[in-house]
Image: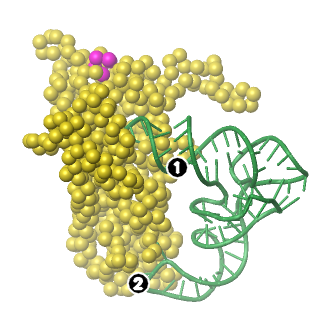
Chain colours: A yellow, B green
Amino acid sequence: MQRALNVTREHFADWYQAVVRDADMAETSPVRGAMVIKPWGYGVWELLQQDLDRRIKATGHENCYFPLFIPLSFIAKEAEHVEGFAKEMAIVTHHRLKNIDGKLVPDPAAKLEEPLVVRPTSETIIGDAFARWVKSHRDLPLLINQWANVVRWEMRPRLFLRTTEFLWQEGHTAHATEAEAIEETRKMLEVYRDFAEHVLAMPVIAGEKPENERFPGAVNTYSIEAMMQDGKALQAGTSHFLGTHFAEAQNIRFQNDAGGMEFCNTTSWGVSTRLIGGVIMTHGDDDGLRLPPAIAPRQIVVVPMLRDKPEDEEVLAYCKSLVEALSSLSAFGYPVRALLDTKKIKSAEKRWNWVRRGAPIIIEIGPRDAAGGNITYMRRDDLRDGDKVKSVAISRREFIEEKALQMLNEIQHGLYAEAKARLDDSIKRDVTDWAGVESYFAGSDDEFKGWLRVSWGKPSGAALDAVETKLKALKLTIRNAPLDQPAEFAACIFSGAPGVEEILIGRSY
RNA sequence: CGGAGCGUAGCGCAGCCUGGUAGCGCAUCUGGUUUGGGACCAGAGGGUCGUGUGUUCGAAUCACACCGCUCCGACCA
């Protein structure tokens, strides 16, 4: 059968790269590990950003912007934090180049007194501001967000999932009490969960990370975990309760109503362009990307079937008025994004380009449609009947007045339902001992395995290290401990001791 | 940074073993024929063969070094 891609999801890693390329999402750049995000991919990011920004503001946060460069000494203030990020930081040491023996090199005379780190995250530089901004309990809570680029020198980059430079949003808040900061941490996790499910149509499981997976410097780290079509987990967003660790390191203090000085409790939380990788691996199929309408830069694309004949004029005029009518509708709280594709390439090629890019509805209009007041459409979420492409003709009036919005909604919810069913079906709950884990995950890691949900005794320290090592041998990690926990627990899968918590384990990106 | 594989036209690849000055498919451009759906015919353009050094009369081909990419580890939003 002829597919729009030349790889299938059987070869998931190759397939992912093919989708990123053929759907015009992004490409590699001359800079190792850093990607060029192309208009279609960036369009997805902008929509995602727009919606999430609205949610962040609706929960009382304000946007700011802090410098890209952080003095090295700032990073060094929090011990765990510096240790966690030391191995992946880009550092600016000079401010001038010099031509020495025909080679441009950093000018030795222009060495910075204090090196600047390119932010891998902004806790320290924002904390420095917080220390100045917070004086009284009346200044709290301080609720800040920034949209920014950050740099982490990762060993193995992968477009969208792990790039040297990436775009994200990082929230930073300071609170008078621990309880309030914990509430904030959980509230933003819930914002992420709701956003992932409703906007990205990507089901996730919200939970708490085990001690060994915590953000450097955090007291607790929470995450939302999504399951990709190869059964691997993708950490799609994190929310950290930082306690007073950063406040103590950076002297973020306030005077309470009794006149005493107290350290703030702080939080931080973020999601990144990784979400786009998650969308690709959640919804893509063997014909390319399938975008949830809420984040599709073009939700309905009209492809005129032109033949270099006089009736082309009529077809084009018909298409234009169709696109105008569609654009005056609104879906998901925004005007419908419809496009008339007038690019001077063959119509058939246009169709397949939009299939690969994942435009939710593709309409093809020929002279007979124009004359008869009809349209012919394809739904990207239901593209084929066996090998054949499903192409449906209906009246233009019915489409505009009824079907268009209905279909966009159906596609949004259908993609979610499909992914949700896969997630639910792929979490195995009946493995009760370590031998069962070993036999379940035996064999190639290309095989679809999904996750296990098991009980454990929540060990810490050396006992947790032992668990981590045990899991690592099977390439497994603990994803999180889901927020919804049962009342009773089976025995710990690692030790046989009484269980105290259920956790998800699986392979991950 | 360790192990493996790969760098030849925009993309996918052949040629390398056995050295003789670069080829195929798709894409692109031009002309024509087609036209309810991924068309056909003819012609054309496009390549410092990843970079450098060496061996040689001669290197895509052999040797060495470096760079980059992909996969597997360590790291991770």
**Labels 2 and 1 touching (C-beta < 8 A):** no
Determine the chain carrying the residue at label 1: A
At x 40%, y 81%, the residue is A366
Q: Look at mark 1 in the image and give the residue it sits on.
A: A28
Relative height, residue A123 to residue A315 (above, below)? above
Q: Is A63 within the magenta?
A: no
Dot 2 corresponds to which residue?
Answer: A367
Q: Is residue A248 magenta?
A: yes
Q: Which residues are magenta?
A: A246-250
Q: Residue at x 40, y 66 (%)?
A: A286
For the residue marked with disc 2, what is the amino acid? Pro
Q: Residue at x 38, y 68 (%)?
A: A301
Q: Secondary structure at mark 1?
A: strand
Image location (x, y in percent) of residue A15: 44, 59
Q: Quadrant of residue A488?
A: top left
Answer whether residue A157 is visible to the viewer in this image: yes
Image position of A364 (left or right of A455): right
Q: At label 1, which amino acid type do we have?
A: Thr
Q: Mark 2 vs mark 1: which is more N-terminal?
A: 1
Where's residue A496, x and y in %?
Answer: 19, 38
**Residue A295 point in image, percent of width and height:** 32, 56
Q: Is residue A418 above or below residue A350?
A: above
Q: Can you name the residue that lies furthest to the top here?
A: A259
Q: Residue at x 52, y 49 (%)?
A: A28
Check disc 2 and report its element: helix, strand or loop: helix
Q: Nearer the viewer, residue A12 or A475?
A: A475
State the separation of the CA atoms marked 2 and 1: 41 Å
Q: Chain of mark 2?
A: A
Q: Is residue B49 left or right of residue A312?
A: right
Question: What is the crowding at mark 2: few (fewer than 14 residues within 10 Å), some, or many (at least 20)?
Answer: many
Position of residue A5 relative to residue B30, above or below, is above
Q: Extreme left residue here?
A: A487
